Image: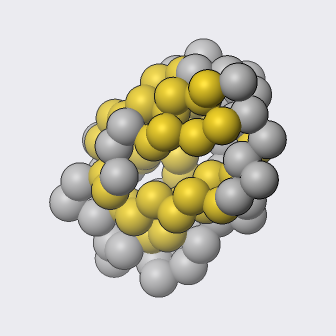
Amino acid sequence: MIQINVSIAAALNPDPIKIKSGDTVVWTNNTTSVQTASSNDAGQTFTTGPIQPGANSLPITVPSTTGYFVQPAGLQGTVNVNT
């Protein structure tokens, strides 16, 4: 299992996120405002909760391929999970 780090800035990097089952994802907020990354199913698959500027989210295991959005930045991305 590995950890993938995703930068939230003017864009998401990397996007799409490519992980294997059991890997974790950590979002880093490189903006000047609080951000939240949540799955497109109203956060039922995952949500980071508020991420302060310059801070990281807690590691999240994403169970299946899903789209996600970052608010209030208005960014959208995809997590591809290969089992």
Residue reaching furthest bottom? 54
Residue drawn where x is 53% and y is 46% of the image: 37
- The spot of residue 24 in percent (x, y) is 70, 51
Residue 44 or 15: which is nearer the viewer? 15
Q: Residue at x 47, y 82 (%)?
A: 54
In the image, what residue occupies the spot 46% across and 59% down?
6
Q: Is residue 30 above or below residue 8?
A: below
Q: Where the C terminus falls, by quadrant? A: top right
Position of 29 relative to 21 (above/below)? below
Q: From the viewer's perspective, tell me whether residue 13 is left or right of residue 58.
A: left
Residue 50 in view, yes or no: no
Q: Residue at x 39, y 64 (%)?
A: 7
Q: How is the image coloured?
A: secondary structure
Is 50 placed left or right of 40 in the picture? right
Residue, far top: 41
Look at the picture and state if 33 lies above or below 47: below
Q: Please state the horizontal and vertical placement of residue 57, each as a whole percent of the image.
A: 64, 64
Whether residue 22 is visible, yes or no, is: yes
- Does 61 sit above or below residue 5? above
Q: Nearer the viewer, residue 44 or 19?
A: 19
- In-image side of 68 versus 60 (left or right): left
